[in-house]
Image (spheres, helix red, strand yellow):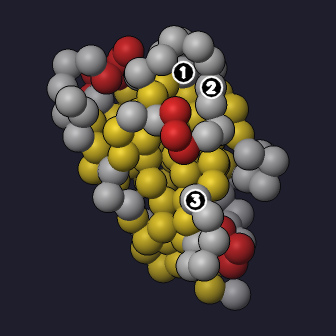
Amino acid sequence: QVQLVESGGGLVQAGGSLRLSCAASGRTFSSYTMGWFRQAPGKEREFVAAITQSSSTYYAESVKGRFAISRDNAKNTVYLQMNNLKPEDTAVYYCAADRRYSGISVYTYTYNYWGQGTQVTVSS
C-alpha cells in the first residue's frame, strides 16, 4: 500500500511558477512510475507528466517545455515544476503511482494509488 500526499498548490498570476511535491509512504517508492494528472471543473482528469523508475519522462503536449517532473527516491518524493503558468492550467493536480514496469501510461486506470489533490489556480 502506498499513500501519496501532494503539496505546493496555490494561487499564482499568469506567467508565474509553482512547484508541486508529492510525498509517498513506504519503502518501495523507487519501484513505481509516478505520474501527475489534473482535473479542471467540469472536465475529465487528464495526464500531465510521468517519470519512470529509471527517470525517463513524458509530458502532455500542452505542458511540454513549461513543466518538469523529477523524483528524489531518497526522499520518496516526486516533483512537478510548473513555469510560465497559464489560466488554462487551473485545476486540481493529483499525483499517482503505477507499479507496472512497462513504460509510461497516460491512462488513469493504470495507476494504482492516488493522492488527494492540490488546487492550482492561475489568474489572468
Amino acid type shown at disc 1: Thr
- Mark 1 or 2, nearer chain start: 1
- Helix, strand or loop under label 3: loop
CB-based contact (under 8 Å), mark 3 and mark 1? no
Q: CA distance from mark 1 to mark 2?
A: 7 Å
What residue is drawn where x is 36% and y is 46%? Answer: 114
Q: Which residue is mark 2?
A: 104
Q: Which residue is mark 3?
A: 45
Q: Is residue 4 left or right of residue 15?
A: left
Looking at the rendered image, the quarter that the N terminus falls into is: top left
Looking at the rendered image, the quarter that the C terminus falls into is: bottom right
Q: Which mark is residue 74?
A: none
User: Would residue 22 be visible to someone looking at this image?
Assistant: no
CB-based contact (under 8 Å), mark 1 and mark 2? yes
Q: Which residue is mark 1?
A: 52
On the image, the x and y values in percent for residue 79 come to 45, 42
Q: Vertical placement of 11 versus 4: above or below? A: below
Q: CA distance from mark 3 to mark 1?
A: 20 Å
Amino acid type shown at disc 2: Ile
User: Would residue 64 be visible to someone looking at this image?
Assistant: yes
